[in-house]
Image: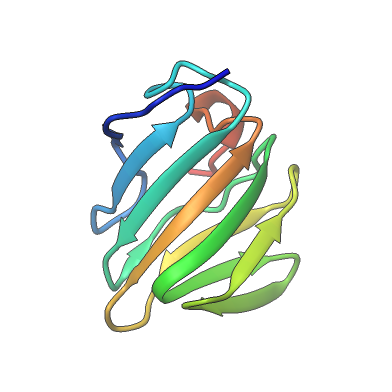
Amino acid sequence: MIRMIKSPSLIKASGVPEKKIEEYFGNVNSKSGDVSIALMNSPSGWEEPFQNPSFDEYTVVLDGELRVECGGAVYDVKAGEAILVGKNERVRYSTPADGGARYIAVCLPAFSPDTVHREN
C-alpha cells in the first residue's frame, strides 16, 4: 500500500502557551488508528498536565530541548536525542528552556483524546 500525504492537519494542543501540532498520520489526517506521526513546535514555557496514555510514544527532538517527567525522573531530551515512553506510564511533557523545542512524536497505536488520559 502506498499513501501520499500532501499536508498535515493542525491539531489543537493541550497545555499553555499554545503549541503547534501538525499531524501527518493518525486519527485526524489519515483516518488511521494504527499509528500517529506528528511534528510538534513547542514554545518556551509550554507545559501540559500529567497523563497516563494507552499508547507507546516515541519522540525525536530535532531542535531545542524537551523535558519529560516520568517514573520519578526528569529527562531533558536535546536536539539529536530521542526517548520512548511506554504505554500506561504517568508522564508529563514540557519545554521550559529558552527556544522551546521542535520534535517528532510517533504514537503506537495512534494518539487519541480518549486514550491519553490527562489529569486535570
Residue at (43% x, 44% y) in the render? 38
Q: With respect to residue 85, does 120 lie above or below?
A: above
x and y, in percent, of residue 56 in the image: 69, 44
x and y, in percent, of residue 37 in the image: 49, 40
**Residue 1 versus residue 42: which sits nearer the camera?**
1
**Residue 47 versus residue 61: which sits nearer the camera?**
61
x and y, in percent, of residue 87 in the image: 74, 43
Residue at (55% x, 53% y) in the render? 50
x and y, in percent, of residue 19 in the image: 28, 53
> Where does the N terminus fall, quadrant-wise?
top right
Residue at (42% x, 55% y) in the render? 48
Left or right of 87 in this view: 97: left
Query: Residue lying furthest front in this view?
Result: 2
**Residue 87 versus residue 47: which sits nearer the camera?**
87
Q: With respect to residue 98, does 20 lie above or below?
A: above
Q: With respect to residue 1, does 68 lie above or below?
A: below
